[in-house]
Amino acid sequence: MKKAIIVTVNAKDKGRLEELIALAETLGYTIVKVFSQQRKRPDPRFLLGKGKFKELINYVKGLQSESKRDNITIIFDGNLKPIQFFNIYRELKNVNILDRVQLILEIFDEHAGTREAKLQIELARLKHVKPIVKEWIRQRKIGELPGFLGSGKYDVDAYYLMIKRRITRITQELEKLRKLREKLRKSRRKAGINTVAIIGYTSAGKTSIFNALTGERKKVGEEPFTTLTTKHKAVILEDNLKVLLMDTVGFIDYIPVEIIEAFYSTLEEIVESSLLLLIIDVSEEINEVKRKIRGVFETLRRIGVSGKPMIVVFNKIDLVEEEKKVEEKVNLLKNVVSENYENIVTYINASAKKGFGISEITKEIVKVLKKDMVKVFVSVPESKLGEIYLPLRIISRSNGFYKCEVYTYKDYLLATLKTLKKVNAQ
Ligand SMILES: Nc1nc2c(ncn2[C@@H]2O[C@H](COP(=O)(O)OP(=O)(O)OP(=O)(O)O)[C@@H](O)[C@H]2O)c(=O)[nH]1
Ligand SMILES: [Mg+2]
């Protein structure tokens, strides 16, 4: 049995602790106890104060003598400092120690389907353990510890070197993949295709909305981080107006820097998209919904998104019972959203499950994107019509020519005119 003890100091709200428990349970841990403490500041040595830490040690010893075969893990809420990790490890032999970063990475790992996702997870892990190993080296030098995790005296130096080399290698490889994506993005925009990024807290229903808008059947699930790699699908909304809808990795409250840096490099695509579709699960208790909304905006700030137009979708409306309550809740949430973001286009109530609000979302997307486009009137020879990949609407047809309205993005107007000339359009 995978038993886990959760340790939290100065937990700000219940929701976050419950979330940590849910994350651990997702990984198959059974939570046997929660140690929580309020103190002026976390203890620099053990996070918990001396007395409470003793209690933890005794509790673990009790568990260990009860059953030798059980695997015991201690999960710390928040991020342990290397010295704390080291101190705790020294006092508590034969248990696994995880903090929030490692826990999230374990879940990511279970869902990682692509090579890129796997590399990103490995990079985040290496960056996370690097300072801990460094601390180990420091402790050994001052004579506190003979070896690393019970291994030979100098293995720890070799291990540290390996970590550094591997970080360099992976960073290079990810950089190549990133450049490739960048090229793709540019060519899409030239072809008049805009990207709409569907974003939101994990389990908000992003993939469900993505599926409803595209007719896809990508995997949805109750578990957090069902989606780990951004998925694209081109859809034609109207008059040849093609957009690329993008389903993304869910956010989570307090994403550690390592994960943002390594894993969320894919989220660059969010930074470069034309429009954001923010999905909010309104079915939960109001304070929980608010906490998650703030978490999302915090992440957006950290990845450098601001001012981009955003459509806010209040999803899972089917789970809120009375209509009056929906109205009340949604109004409160609008305040939280508008306090945190500048450019909200509109708010839409929806249920991906019941198909409610989906056509409204489409309509609003079209409205926003067309704002950024200009119309050009041209006559195109019939045989060449198929060579125009831009959104267009045929107005009339005469003498072998189609009279059309062609849409293009303002910043690509010159390029578009050139392309039109090539197909003898006038
Ligand atoms: N009742 C109800 N359930 C919904 C609705 N939309 C999504 N769900 C459920 O919510 C859960 C999460 O949905 P997903 O679409 O996987 O959510 P996600 O945001 O893509 O989640 P991650 O990829 O894990 O971050 C699933 O069990 C869905 O069936 C809705 O409108 N109503
Ligand atoms: Mg998903």
Image (cartoon, rainbow, N blue to C red):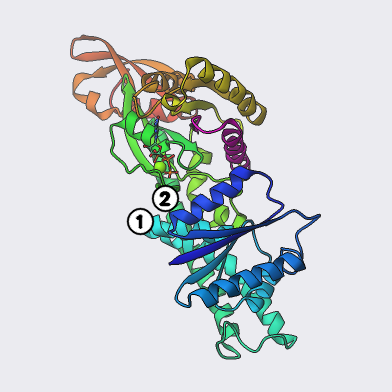
Q: Cβ–Cβ below 8 Å for labels 1 and 2?
A: yes
| Disc 1 packing (10 Å; few <14; some 14–19; many ≥20) | few
Say left or right for 362 vs 167.
left
Whether the residue carrying mark 2 lies under 8 Å from ligand 1 is answered with yes
Magenta stretch: helix, strand or loop mostly? helix
Query: Looking at the picture, which amino acid does disc 2 mark?
Result: Leu
Above/below status of 416 relative to 27: above
The N terminus sits in image quarter: bottom left
SS under mark 1? loop
Can residue 176 be seen at all in this image of the molecule? no
Q: Report the residue marked by disc 1.
A: 113
Q: Nearer the viewer, residue 247 or 90?
A: 90
- Mark nearer the N terminus (1 vs 2): 1
Residue 368, x across and y down, in percent: 48, 21
Say left or right for 141 vs 371.
right
**Image quadrant assignment for residue 155:** bottom right
Say which mark, if any, is on residue 228: 2
Above/below status of 386 relative to 100: above
SS under mark 2? loop
Say which mark, if any, is on residue 176: none
Residue 263, x across and y down, in percent: 50, 54
Span colored in magenta: 279-301
Q: Nearer the viewer, residue 263 or 268?
A: 263
Q: Residue at x 29, y 27 (%)?
A: 388
Residue 330, x across and y down, in percent: 55, 22
Residue 415, x across and y down, in percent: 42, 31
